[in-house]
Image (cartoon, rainbow, N blue to C red):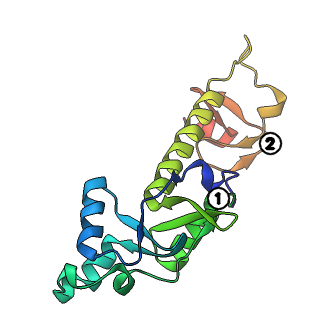
């Protein structure tokens, strides 16, 4: 199911990049100072990998490796999985789930332009849920005629009590209900 929302609308622009020959201790210091959970690793101007907090724990701390003794080249995750800035948000979610990752660098014309994270996706999901909730509430506040009649266009649909589709709905206590549910109220 596509959302119609491109990645570029929710991504973080200008992700933090570091050179492939950077020492782990310097990369960790950068992550701490900037309060980020990952760094994009570049060789020249080309993104070639990503260093995440998970990489640090799994490949350095758990092995009691001295951070000054190795560079990003030895611990970064590569190959770099990317997504195009114009792709739908849903595709990013699907890719993250399939690849078991929490961050995806975003590219446009093969150039790094951003980073989208699982937190970005959760934020947009919550926002879309709030919008949907407002739309539902707006439709609940329909103007009912003086005689309490329902306009023909909404007299059929899903009963707000039992959840089944009916051709003959009517209002009771502010909710559209089928005849059966109205009788039990």
Quick check: 160 above or below 23? above
Secondary structure found at label 2: loop
Percent position of residue 3, x then y: 67, 53
The residue labelled by disc 2 is: 167
Residue drawn at x 54%, y 69% as measured from the top left: 45
Q: Residues within 10 Å of mark 2 (few under 14, many from 20)?
A: few
Percent position of residue 32, x then y: 25, 59
Residue drawn at x 62%, y 28% as measured from the top left: 138
Residue drawn at x 59%, y 41% as measured from the top left: 132
Residue drawn at x 35%, y 87% as measured from the top left: 74
**177, 10: nearer the viewer:** 10
Left or right: residue 11 compared with residue 139:
left
Percent position of residue 116, x then y: 51, 59
Q: Residue 184, can we see it? A: no
Q: Residue furthest top?
A: 146
Quick check: 155 above or below 55? above
Q: Residue furthest front?
A: 44
Secondary structure found at label 1: loop
Quadrant occupied by the C terminus? top right
In the image, which is nearer the foreground, mark 2 or mark 1? 1
Q: Are marks 2 and 1 in contact (CB under 8 Å)?
A: no
* CA–CA distance in space, label 2 to label 1: 44 Å
Q: Residue 95, can we see it? A: yes
Left or right: residue 146 compared with residue 76:
right
> Residue 137 occupies which quadrant of the picture?
top right
Mark closer to the chain start, 2 or 1 = 1
Question: Residue 85 got which mark?
Answer: 1
């Amino acid at each position: 199911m596509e959302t119609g929302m491109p990645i570029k609308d929710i991504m973080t622009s200008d992700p933090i990049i570091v050179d492939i020959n950077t020492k782990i201790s310097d990369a960790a210091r950068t992550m701490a100072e900037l309060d980020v959970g990952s760094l994009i690793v570049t060789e020249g101007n080309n993104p070639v990998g990503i260093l995440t907090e998970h990489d640090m724990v799994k490949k350095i701390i758990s092995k009691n490796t001295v951070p000054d003794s190795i560079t990003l080249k030895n611990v970064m995750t590569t190959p770099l999985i990317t997504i195009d800035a114009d792709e739908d948000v849903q595709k990013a979610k699907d890719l993250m789930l399939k690849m078991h990752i929490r961050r995806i660098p975003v590219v446009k014309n093969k150039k790094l332009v951003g980073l989208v994270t699982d937190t970005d996706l959760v934020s947009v999901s919550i926002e879309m849920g709030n919008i949907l909730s407002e739309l539902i509430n707006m439709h609940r506040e329909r103007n009912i005629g003086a005689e309490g009649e329902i306009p023909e266009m909404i007299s059929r649909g899903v009963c707000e009590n039992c959840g089944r589709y009916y051709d003959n709905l009517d209002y009771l206590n502010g909710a559209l209900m089928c005849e059966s549910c109205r009788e039990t109220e």
